[in-house]
Image (tube, rainbow, N blue to C red):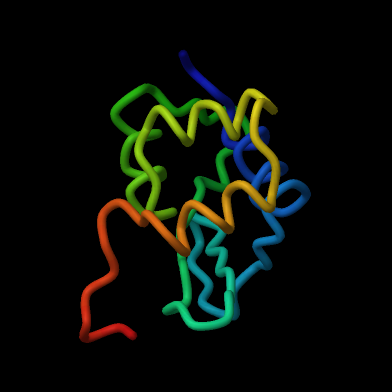
Amino acid sequence: MSRSAKDIRQCLEGKLGFVESEHKSDDHYWYELHLSGLPVITTKVSRGSKAHYDDSLEAKVAKQLHVRKSFYNRVMSCELDRQQYYDEVSTNPYPPFSNKTR
């Protein structure tokens, strides 16, 4: 399934509580999420108004969010909420956070 960059940005900000990062680039919005006891979770989304993410790009976003692609799809389709995402990255992050970032 292909999702627009706009839809992904709206989910990050509205549903999951990510905030736009101070890190800037001309071609991407950068987002971060601070959760107690975890490293900062960061991701980036294209600034292109017509940008659509195919499965491989969405898999990269899921990895940056530290969840499996199937879990990411359920978040994006509104099957799971913010708290369920927070619980997942706190108890079962994928890929796991490295000890260097904790």
Using residue 86 as the reference point, say whether residue 72 is left or right of it. left
Q: Residue at x 70, y 41 (%)?
A: 81
Q: Is residue 95 above or below residue 49?
A: below
The picture places residue 26, in percent across and down from the top left corner, at: 51, 61
For this orientation, the residue located farthest to the top is 1
Q: Residue at x 48, y 52 (%)?
A: 88
Q: Is residue 25 above or below residue 4?
A: below
Q: Nearer the viewer, residue 7 or 74?
A: 74
Count of numbered badges drawn on the protein: 0
Question: Where on the picture, by quarter, is residue 38?
Answer: bottom left
Q: Nearer the viewer, residue 91 or 8?
A: 91
The picture places residue 40, in percent across and down from the top left corner, at: 47, 76
The picture places residue 1, in percent across and down from the top left corner, at: 46, 13
The picture places residue 55, in percent across and down from the top left corner, at: 35, 23
Q: Residue at x 57, y 81 (%)?
A: 36
Q: Is residue 2 above or below residue 30?
A: above
Q: Quadrant of the C terminus?
A: bottom left
Q: Nearer the viewer, residue 52 or 81?
A: 81
Q: Residue at x 55, y 23 (%)?
A: 3
